[in-house]
Amino acid sequence: MFSKSKIFITLLALMLIASACGGSAPTAVSEEPAVVQEPAAGVSTEAPAEMMDVSGDLVIYSGRSEPLLQPVIDAFKAQYPNVNVLLKAGSNSELANALIEEKANPQADVFITTELFTIQSLAREGIFASYSPSGVEQLPSEFRGPDNTWTGLTRRARVIMYNKDLVAEDELPTSIFDLTDAKWRGQIAAAGSTNGSMQAQIAAMRQLLGEEATQEWLYGLIANEVTFFGGHTDVRKAVGAGEFKLGLVNHYYFYLQQAEGSNVGIIFPDQGEGQIGLITNATSAAIVKGGKNLTAAQAFLDFLVSPEGQKLFAEQNYEYPLLPGVALREGVQPLDGFRLADVDIAQAALDFDATFDLMERVGLP
Amino acid sequence: MEITRANQFSLQRLRTYPISPRLAIAAGLVALFVAVPLVYIFIRALGAEPEAWQRLLQTRIWKLLSNTLLLAAAVTSGALVTGISMAWLTERTDLPGRKIFRWMLAMPLAVPAYIGGIVHLALLRPRGGVIPQFLESLFGQPVPTPSPLGFWGAAFILTLFMYPYVYLLSGAAFRTLHASLEEAARVFGRTPMQTLFQVTLPALRPGLTAGALLVALDILAEYGTVALLRYETFSSAIFVQLSGRYDRSAASILSGILVALSILILWGELRLQGQARFTQMESNWRPAPLVALGKWRIPALLLVLGVVSASLLVPFTVLLIWSIQAFLDPQTMATLFRTGSQGFGSYVWNSLWSSGAAAVIAVMLSLPVALLAVRYPSRFSRFISRLCQVGYAIPGVVIALSLVLLVNRALPFLYATPFVVVIAYVLRHMPQAVRASESALNQLSPSLEEASRTLGRTSLQTLIQVTMPLILPGLLAGGSLVFLTSLKELPATLLLRPAGFDTLAVRVWVWAGEGFYFQAAPAALLLVLVSALPLSFLLRREQIFK
C-alpha cells in the first residue's frame, strides 16, 4: 500500500509552493506605483491631482495582441497610477462575441480592435456608449464611428514582406494577386481565417472586387500551398528566418522584423493602373455601454487619442497615427505617396457575415 | 489510471439499512449539476436554425468527422502499440535500467501535449526548425526532415504524450497477471511470442480497450496540440467558429455532434470497464519469469531511450535551455516578472488555487455518488454514477461554451469570475474523482460502517468518523488526478478566464502563440514540474512502482 508520510510530504510541499508563490499575488489590486515603467518622452512624470482621482479596475478587451498594446498601457498607468488595468487579449471576433453575450451584464470597460468592421458591427448592435475623446475632432471623419460610438486610433497597410536573401529585386511581386503565381508555390506565409487583419483584408477585397474574384484569389492561395499561421508574428519571424520567401502582413511587422536585424524588404502592392490600390485598415477603440469604470475608460480613450498615446503607437509599433501632426517613426514610409484602396467601412461591416461564409466555404485554414 | 480491483464486497450489501433518501437526493443533485451543461448544449444544437445546420452539413461536418476519427484512431493505435511494448519491455524482459525507465515512461503524463507540441514544432518545423537549419548549415543545402505539422505530425506528437495511459494499465496488468496462465501456455508448447499474443494480451484485452477508449476521448477533446499543428478537428473547429462570425449556433451544432460522438465512445468504455478485472487473487501470485532479450538488448534499449527522449527528455531539456535564455535576457525578465495581475506569481497562484479548488470540490461532490453506487447498487445508482462520468465526453471547449451561455443567463453574478473556470474544471474532471472514490469505497468492507451504525452513530457521523478516514488515500488520489488535469486544461480556461485572470497554461499558450518561446518556457517548465508532484504521488500507488 501507500505510506501516509509520503502523502503528507506531498501535500506539505504543494502547500509550501502555493504559499510561496501566492505571497505577493492575491493583493494584485494594490499596484505599487514605485515600479512604474519609464514614461515615454514628452510625458510629464508628475501625475496631477485629477489623474490620481481616476482609480479602480479598468477592464480592456483587446483584439490587438498583448505585446503590441502593453507599452501603451504601461505609459497610461504611469499617468494614472491608481488605475489597475486588467487586460484580456484575444481575437477581435472572439471578444466581440463575448461583448454581445455580455450585453445585459457588461464586464469590459474598453474594447480595442485591429480593424474597423468588427467595431462598426458592434456599434450597430448598441454595445458601445458614445464618447468624444478630447482632440478627436482632429481625426479624419471616416475614422470615427456613428454617434461617436468608436474612435479610430492608428492606420496600417496590408503589405508583402520578403526575405532579401532569397528574392531578387527584379522578381518581386507587385500585386497581392501575384501571390497565386505558381512560381511562389510553398514559399508564402500568411495569417489564417481567425486573424482580424486577414478577415478585414478579405472583407475589403469582397467589396472592391466582388465575391467571385475574392474567392478565386483565396482558392489560388490555398492551391499555391500558402502556409497560414495563427498570427503575424509567426509570419514575420518565418520570413525573417528564410523559412518563406514572402509574407502577407501588416506593414509594421516588416519594420519589427527589420529591427530584429533580418534582411527583409517591403512591397506596397497594387499601385499600378487598374489595380485595387493599397488596402489599409485602422485600429480602433470604444467604451462599452454599462461598463463599471466609465471615468477610467474615458481617461484611457483620451490617452489613446492624445499626442503622447499616438506617438507611442507610432514609435513602438511603426504605425500611422491618425492624429495629424504626430510624426512617423523614422524610416517608416508615409502613406501619402500611395494609392489607397477606397473601402466603405459601414458597408463592409454589414457584409462581414458574408466574408465569414466565404472563408468557410473556401476552407481557409 | 488506477486498475479497478475485483469488487470484493459488493455482494455483501448492507441489507439492514434501506437506501437513504438524503444520500439519493445529494447524489441526484450532483448528477443534475453535471448533466445541465450537456443537456443545454444539445438544446442549443437542436434549436439552431436549419440554415446553419445545412451550411455546416454541406461544408464542414463530414471533413471534420473524418479528420477527428482518423486522428483518434491513429493516436489510439499508436498509444496501444507504444504503451504495450514499453510495458512489456520494462516488466517482462531483462532490459537494462528498466526500474528507472518505468518512471521515465510514465512521467510524460506531466507534460501537457501542447507544450510537447510547441517544443517539437520549434525543433522540427520544416525549414525554420532548429534541426532542419542545423542540417542545412551542415550539408550546405536543405535536407528534408519529417514535418510535425498536419495529420502525421499531430498523430506522432499526441501518441508521444498519450501512450503513458496505456503503458500504466498494461504495465500493471503484466505485473499482476498470474504466471500460471502463461506457464500453462508454455507447457502446451507455445513459444514466448505465441504466449504473449495468444494468452497474455487477450487476457489483458478488456482493460486495455477501456484505456484505449479513454485515449480516444482525450483526442476528441484535444485543442491545443491540433490547433498548433494545424490539423483541424471538431474541437479546434469549434474554437475557430467562436472567433469567427457573431453567431454561436454553428459552434453549438459542432459541439452537439462532438459530444454525441464522445458519448458513444464513453458508453463503450463504461461497458468494458466493468470487465476490466484482470487482477487475480493475490494469495499465490508470483512474478512471471523475465524473457532474456539476448542480442535484442541493445535495439530494445535504443527503442525505449528513443521514446523517453522524445516524450520527456527532449521537451524538458529544451524548456530548460529556453528558460535559462529567458533569465539571461533582461527584457524578457522584465515582461515575465511584472507586478500585479500580470506578474508571474499571479499566474502560478491562479493555476494552483483554481486547480486545487476544483480538486476539493470534485472529490466532495463525488462522495455521495460513489456511496450510493457502491453501497446501494441499483439501476438508479448506476445511472447516477454513469451520468457523473459524462465529463469525460464533454471537451473543454464545449464546457466553456455551455457555461458562458448558461451562467450569463442564469447566474449573471457569477459570470466573468474565476469561479466559472473552477466549475468548468469540476465538470470536466469529475469522472476521475467519481472513479477514484468508488474504487476506494469498493475496497472498504461495509461491515465497519455497519458496526458504527450498530453502535449508535448516525449515517452522517459514520461517514465522517469511519468511512472518510479509511478511504482518505483513495480520495487524495482522485483529488490529485483532478488537480493534475485541471492544471493542464487549456481551452476552457482560455474561453472562460475573466480579464486579468491568467493561469500558467494560458500564459504558455499566449506567449508561444506570439512566437515568444523563451518567455513561455519558464511558465511551461513550472507547469510540468508542478504536475510532476501529484503525478509521482499517484504513481507510487500503482503496482509497478512499488
Image: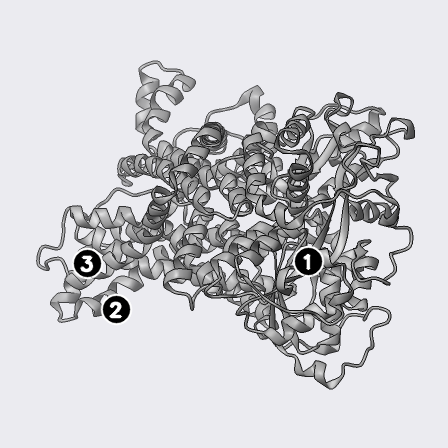
Q: Residue furthest top?
A: B189
Q: Residue B6, image x and y in percent?
A: 26, 42
| Residue B457 versus residue B100 in the image, above or below | below
Residue type at the position of mark 1:
Ser
The reply to whether residue A8 is in sight is no
Quote the CA–CA distance across marks 2 and 3: 20 Å
The reply to whether residue A56 is in sight is yes
Q: Dot 1: within a 10 Å radius of its alpha carbon, few (fewer than 14), some, or many (20 or more) residues? A: many
Q: Dot 2: within a 10 Å radius of its alpha carbon, few (fewer than 14), some, or many (20 or more) residues? A: some
Q: Which label's residue is closer to the chain start, 2 or 3? A: 3
Residue corresponding to mark 2 = B465
Which picture quadrant has residue B457? Answer: bottom left
Residue corresponding to mark 1 = A284
Which picture quadrant has residue A360? Answer: top right
Q: Dot 3: within a 10 Å radius of its alpha carbon, few (fewer than 14), some, or many (20 or more) residues? A: many
Q: Chain of mark 1?
A: A
Q: What residue do we see at 57% from left, 69% from top? A: A22
Q: Chain of mark 2?
A: B
Asked if disc 2 and disc 3 are in contact, CB closer than 8 Å, the reply is no
State whether discs 1 and 2 lie on one chain: no
